[in-house]
Image (spheres, rainbow, N blue to C red):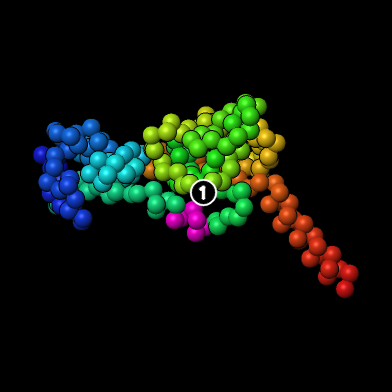
Amino acid sequence: DGERGDIVYSVNRGIDFGASLVEGPLADSAAARAYRQVWEEDDGRLVFEDVAPYYPIRDEPVCFVGAPVLMQGRKVGVALFVLTLDRFDAVLNTSAPLEGNSAMYLVGPDYRPRSRLDLLRATQAEGETSEAGVAIDIEPGRAVLRRSGRPHRPHEDDGTRLDTEPARTVFHLGTMGNGIYKGPSGEEAFVAYAPVDVLGVTWALIAQVDTKTAFAAVGKMQESSAFYINR
């Protein structure tokens, strides 16, 4: 309901069904912020509210997309669509299945991950892996993340920040690029990055593949080419 801010319809009929987005425990939620933006704006545009834990679904990190509901040209309500980050994971995994120490992931403007992050980084001092999954600065900002068996859920309370040179380049300069980045243990990776606009909010899309995997593929291509040339 646009005027009262009450949730009058819910597909899943969760615990937020019938709740108010104007007062009470959900008044400061991402859903409430998306509702207010749509209801108070007159341009009829879609509104995107970036990732935040949402209590009614077990504090799952979700995004909200808001749109006005019109009746005979008059705005009478707000429709909110919930996007879990599993949807973004599915797109990344389907479009670019990666092997070895390779990964593709999304980073938000707060430098927190916007997709599952089953990577670890090596600590700067001793080159040991850290369960925190935090990317640290190496030669400033040059960090290589490494795979781990433990998937990381965005907004886990572990202080994870991917404040790396590729992410900073996207958010401060708004540009795409690529390069070879080296971790403290000497591991190297090709890293490519680009800004992604999500309804006015910029995320960084970062892909990396370790040089061993990349060069192995090149070596196989060279061997195959030599085979056909020598026949």
The foreground one among 53 and 31 is 53
Residue sitting at x 69%, y 51% = 214
Residue sitting at x 12%, y 46% = 18
- Whole-percent x and y of residue 82? 29, 49
Residue sitting at x 73%, y 51% = 215
Residue sitting at x 76%, y 61% = 221
Q: Is residue 111 left or right of residue 19?
A: right
**Membership of 24 in magenta stretch:** no
Q: If the image is split into quadrants, where does the N terminus sit?
A: top left
- The quadrant holding residue 6 is top left
Type of the residue with mark 1: Gly
Q: Is residue 146 left or right of residue 57?
A: right
- The quadrant holding residue 223 is bottom right
Decide: few, some or many residues near mark 1? Use Cα within 10 Å; few <14, some 14-19, many ≥20: few
Q: Regarding mark 1 in the picture, which secondary structure is present there?
A: loop
Is residue 149 in view?
yes
Q: Main secondary structure of the magenta part?
A: helix
Q: Which residue is mark 1?
A: 149
The foreground one among 25 and 70 is 25
**Membership of 91 in magenta stretch:** yes
- Whole-percent x and y of residue 35? 22, 40
The residue at the far right in this view is 230
Q: If the image is split into quadrants, where does the C terminus sit?
A: bottom right
Residue 82 versus residue 120 in the image, above or below: below
Residue 15 versus residue 229 in the image, above or below: above
Magenta stretch: give its range: 90-95
Q: Is residue 34 left or right of residue 73?
A: right
